[in-house]
Image (cartoon, rainbow, N blue to C red):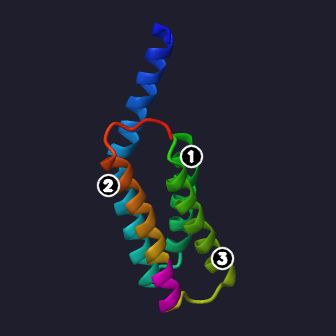
Amino acid sequence: MTNGDDALAEAIRLLRVEYLGDAPERVAELWALLERAENGDSGALDELRRALHKLAGSGGSYGFPELSSKSRAGEHEAQRLLESGAPVSAAEQKTLRSMVQGVADEFADASARGDPTPA
């Protein structure tokens, strides 16, 4: 590797560290949006879908494909519920909770691995 390659690799590593450092706020936002949706806030489900959409894109961009995959699954489920137009049932709430937990777990797993390097 050249010095330029080393500098680029270090810059990418630092960006990934920063991305994971923001994980608690991102996960807290997902939980707050989900809670609002469960309490009947009509716009919260779409906000949750958009937050998951952003994570699906950024997860992949930062080299966390499982985070991206789990976020995308949650996004698609939220979109399906929005398109149905029906109130979100208890079973659907449970499914969304499980999906948000999967995203939270992926962030935790990536952080626990220590110095993040692209997968």
Foreground pick, 109 / 35: 109
Query: Residue 113's x, y, as percent?
Result: 34, 46
Q: Nearer the viewer, residue 116 or 53?
A: 116
Q: CA distance from mark 3 to mark 1?
A: 22 Å
| Residue 16 position by quadrant | top left
Identified by mark 2, the residue type is Pro
Contact (Cβ within 8 Å) of mark 3 with mark 2: no
| Residue at horizontal 38 percent and vertical 69 percent from the top | 31
Q: Residue at x 63, y 77 (%)?
A: 82
Which label is found at residue 24?
A: 2
**Which label number is shown at residue 60?**
1
Magenta: main secondary structure equals: helix
> Circle 2 sits in a helix, a strand or a loop, which is it?
helix
Residue mark closest to the camera, 3 vs 1 = 1
To which residue does mark 3 refer? 80
Q: Can residue 22 be seen from the camera position used here?
A: no
Which residues lie in the magenta part?
A: 90-95
Residue 91 counted in the magenta span: yes
> The residue under label 1 is which amino acid type?
Gly
Q: Earlier in the sequence, mark 3 or mark 2?
A: 2
Q: Where does the image place residue 110, in percent across and percent down from the top left?
A: 38, 49
Calculate the distance from the C-alpha at mark 3 to the C-alpha at mark 2: 27 Å
The Cα atoms of the two marked residues, 2 and 1, are separated by: 18 Å
Residue drawn at x 53%, y 79% is 42
- Please tell me which of labels 3 and 1 falls first in the chain: 1
Above or below for 9 versus 85 = above
Q: Amino acid at mark 3?
A: Arg
